Amino acid sequence: MFRAIAVRFLSKQAVSKVPERNYIPRRALMYVPGDDYKKINKAFGLDVDCIALDCEDGVALNKKDARSNIRAVLDQGKPQKKKNYDFGVRVNSIESGLCHQDLESCLTGRNLPDTVLFPKVEEGDHLKWFADEIRHLIKNNGKINLIIYIETARAFINLNEICKTAMQLSKRFNFIPSALVFGSDDFCANIGQRIHWKFCMHGKKLVLVAKAYNLQAIDMVYIEYKDLDGLKLQCEQGMRMGYTGKQVIHPGQVPVVQEAFLPTKYQIEWAEGLLKSFEEHQKSGKGAFSYRGSMIDMPTMKQAQNIMKLANLAE
Ligand SMILES: CC(C)(COP(=O)(O)OP(=O)(O)OC[C@H]1O[C@@H](n2cnc3c(N)ncnc32)[C@H](O)[C@@H]1OP(=O)(O)O)[C@@H](O)C(=O)NCCC(=O)NCCSC(=O)C[C@H](O)C(=O)O
Ligand SMILES: [Mg+2]
């Protein structure tokens, strides 16, 4: 009796451990240097899922007052576009000594950004620091999404602990963990390498852990920004690994990435047909059946649902 109650209690705990979240599309996550008004205005005219005004690496060390520009942009209110988009601010890392000033500037004005992008997170304690900061800074029950950057060897070693801490803290503090980003450029610098195409193993680990915690996984930046064929190829590789989006640094990259992280017409047609067929077979009492030469059952049906969900959300 006691065991049955304990099992029921534990399984309830396990189920509620990783919450479902509202899905905010972030196929292209576009950086815009926060000190550059011209680029900021340009970005607001683009059809892009996520705009991240940057205080960190896209901004020179002697221009770190970018945070004041960003505050001014936030105070004017989020520019409205035909389609909603995620409006974020990437602050500097804790280690830089600039993070507190960035957060103070960007989170205490008239309007909050939708999302804070938090670079170079290496351990759970970094998130405790962050949670404590925003507890003091954000007023009136405001809440933000949090995107966590994984870009050092230590971060990869501590990945599970980082996500677990984020989940636990989010129950008590005013942020919602939304995504992990693979900061491959910083990762290369951290481990003393130059070329990052070979780091699939780490990229896969990031996807795996992100999915375990219902987080989006956002892939590496492609710095050869004029090579759109190479970008497309890398998007496809990332998508096949399970990434849901990619970092972008130039307007020319946006349409390629936005398109690449959508299901193709063929996939949508396949999924629609499969779902219809699945329903009919369920009614006639068949769990498994044949569809266009493949065996279909519950997991394949869920894959088809994922495709349709993505297609509908990004419309
Ligand atoms: C890479 C760039 C420095 C190139 O800039 P530029 O020479 O100005 O490019 P173009 O002349 O081709 O630009 C054409 C027009 O587009 C505007 N533009 C360019 N980039 C952006 C942008 N990011 N956002 C908005 N608008 C942009 C130009 O102003 C031109 O406008 P117009 O004259 O009206 O036609 C530049 O693209 C750039 O600075 N990109 C951002 C760099 C950046 O943010 N880097 C850091 C992020 S990457 C990262 O952090 C990776 C991760 O952390 C890791 O560790 O891996
Ligand atoms: Mg980085």
Image: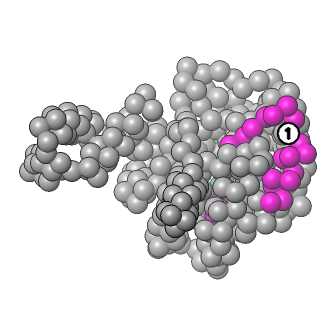
Residue 105 in sight here? yes
Q: Quarter of the image holding residue 138?
A: top right
Residue 152 lies, with reference to residue 240, above or below; the image says below
Q: Considering the image in quadrants, where does the C terminus appear?
A: top left
Q: Secondary structure at mark 1?
A: loop
**Residue 5 screen position, x and y as percent:** 54, 60
Name the residue rendered at 42%, 44% in the picture: 261
- Please report the residue visible at 29 percent of the width from the left and 43 percent of the height from the top: 304
Residue 131 shown in magenta? yes
Q: Which one is nearer the viewer's eye here, 17 or 199?
A: 17
Counting other residues with Cα less than 10 Å from the Cα at mark 1, is it few (<14), some (14-19), or many (20 or more)? some
State which region is magenta: 128-151
- Is residue 206 among the parts visible in the rendering? no
The residue tagged 1 is 138
Furthest residue in direction front, as rendered: 1
| Residue type at numbered disc 1 | Ile
At 81% from the left and 53% from the top, the residue drawn is 131
Q: Tell me where residue 284 appears, x and y as whole percent.
A: 11, 37
Using the rendered view, name the quadrant where residue 49 is placed.
top right
